[in-house]
């Protein structure tokens, strides 16, 4: 019975790993680790395991969604090391657009 349970757990873990890989590919990410970082950020968990400022969580999720969409639209590889620069630029552009009554458009 224990051996059957162990086999079932191994099969479930393998199926989960395959589902994670499929999701990574569908989102245009490079790795399961990158997916986990993005999901953690959306849940308010910082890279170091601490908590993100709750007021910034929705902003982080919105910017990450824009980053993933931009990468997909322009055929770019997602790269977690480049996200901070994208985020900074995105938020500056968003602020400018809001202050000037313009529609923000990424290129």
Image (cartoon, helix red, strand yellow):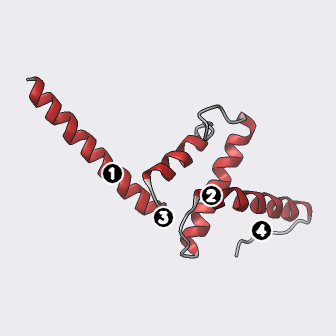
Judging by the rendered image, the residue that carries numbered circle 4 is 104
Judging by the rendered image, the residue that carries numbered circle 2 is 81
Q: Could you say where residue 80 lies in the image, as x and y percent from the top left?
A: 59, 56
Judging by the rendered image, the residue that carries numbered circle 1 is 19
Judging by the rendered image, the residue that carries numbered circle 3 is 28
Q: Could you say where residue 60 lies in the image, as x and y percent from the top left?
A: 67, 48
Q: Are marks 2 and 1 in contact (CB under 8 Å)?
A: no
Q: Nearer the viewer, residue 65 or 24?
A: 24
Mark found first going from the N terminus, 3 or 1: 1
Q: Quadrant of residue 94?
A: bottom right
Q: Secondary structure at mark 3?
A: loop
How far is the residue under mark 4 from the one under mark 1?
34 Å
* Residue count near mark 3 (Cα–Cα under 10 Å), binned few <14, some 14–19, many ≥20: some
Q: Are marks 3 and 4 in contact (CB under 8 Å)?
A: no
Q: Residue 25, relative to residue 10: is it above or below? A: below
Mark in the foreground, 2 or 3: 2
How far is the residue under mark 2 from the one under mark 1?
25 Å
Q: Quadrant of the N terminus?
A: top left
How far is the residue under mark 2 from the one under mark 3?
15 Å
Mark in the foreground, 3 or 4: 3
Q: Residue 81, relative to residue 4: is it above or below? A: below
């Amino acid at each position: 019975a224990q051996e059957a349970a162990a086999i079932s757990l191994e099969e479930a873990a393998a199926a989960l790993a395959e589902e994670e890989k499929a999701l990574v590919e569908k989102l245009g990410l490079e790795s399961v680790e990158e997916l986990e970082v993005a999901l953690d950020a959306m849940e308010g968990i910082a890279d170091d395991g601490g908590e993100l400022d709750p007021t910034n969580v929705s902003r982080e999720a919105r910017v990450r969604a824009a980053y993933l969409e931009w990468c997909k639209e322009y055929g770019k590889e997602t790269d977690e090391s480049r996200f901070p620069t994208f985020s900074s630029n995105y938020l500056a552009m968003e602020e400018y657009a809001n202050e000037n009554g313009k529609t923000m458009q990424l290129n």
